[in-house]
Amino acid sequence: MTELSAMILDRIRDVPDYPQPGVMFKDITPLLADPVAMAAVVEELAGLHQVDKIVGIEARGFILAAPVAYRAGAGFVPVRKKGKLPAATLEESYDLEYGSATIEVHRDAFAPGDRVLIVDDVLATGGTAKAAVDLVERAGATVAGLAVLMELAFLKGRDRLTGVDLHSLVIV
């Protein structure tokens, strides 16, 4: 285990039965509150790829992706839940561990050929991540990679992302 992985794991709190019974929620707020740990995460993610844009997936992905974009000298693009973006959008629906959802991105968020790093907090079943990859590609950009703070390996989300350069800072 790397020093960064240990730092991250020490600052993630398990919350049982949230948001519903049987789910073990991984709370990253202690990590976010630690300026040294947060800076280390941002530095690591910002150095993964040379990109034009960083996509953050709503909502906790925003918290990580925005400072990563700033540090990488790239633009930030939010991928949001359906109905939250004000201009013309592309949308993608997907299944969650406990339901389904639709995410959107502005149609004009990317220039043709933009290289994009998608950032999120957790990779679980891979539905949200795969939908974000599909949205970026449909918008005419190239997915350089997908980076997550934490991968829940037992949910096998990685299996839905074949062909995507996936980087997980910790795998549990």
Image: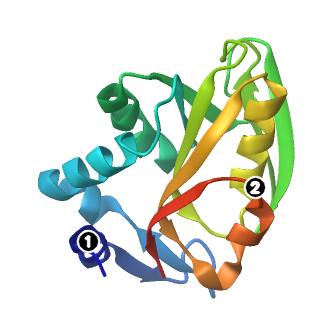
Residue farthest to the left? 36
Judging from the image, the colouring scheme is rainbow
Helix, strand or loop at label 1? It is loop
In terms of sequence position, does the residue under pointer 2 or pointer 1 come before the other? Answer: 1
Q: CA distance from mark 2 to mark 1?
A: 31 Å
Q: Dot 1 surroundings within 10 Å: few (below 14), some, or many (20 or more)?
A: some
Displayed quadrant of residue 1: bottom left
Q: How many marks?
A: 2
**Whether residue 136 can be seen here:** yes
Q: Which residue occupies 64% across, 69% down? A: 124
Question: What amino acid type is highlighted by mark number 2?
Answer: Gly
In the image, residue 128 lies at what x, y percent?
71, 53
Seen in the picture, residue 92 relative to 149 is either above or below; the reply is above
Q: Which residue occupies 46% across, 32% down? A: 50
Between label 2 and label 1, give the one nearer the viewer: 2
Seen in the picture, residue 145 relative to 3 is either above or below; the reply is above
Camera-side residue of 1 and 108? 1
Question: What amino acid type is highlighted by mark number 1?
Answer: Arg
Question: Left or right of 28: which side holds 108?
Answer: right
In the image, residue 165 lies at what x, y percent?
62, 53
Residue identified by numbered label 1: 11
Q: Dot 2 surroundings within 10 Å: few (below 14), some, or many (20 or more)?
A: few
Q: Which residue occupies 71% across, 63% down? A: 126
Q: Are marks 2 and 1 in contact (CB under 8 Å)?
A: no
In the image, residue 77 lies at what x, y percent?
56, 26
Residue 163, numbered circle: 2
Question: Left or right of 1: which side holds 93?
Answer: right
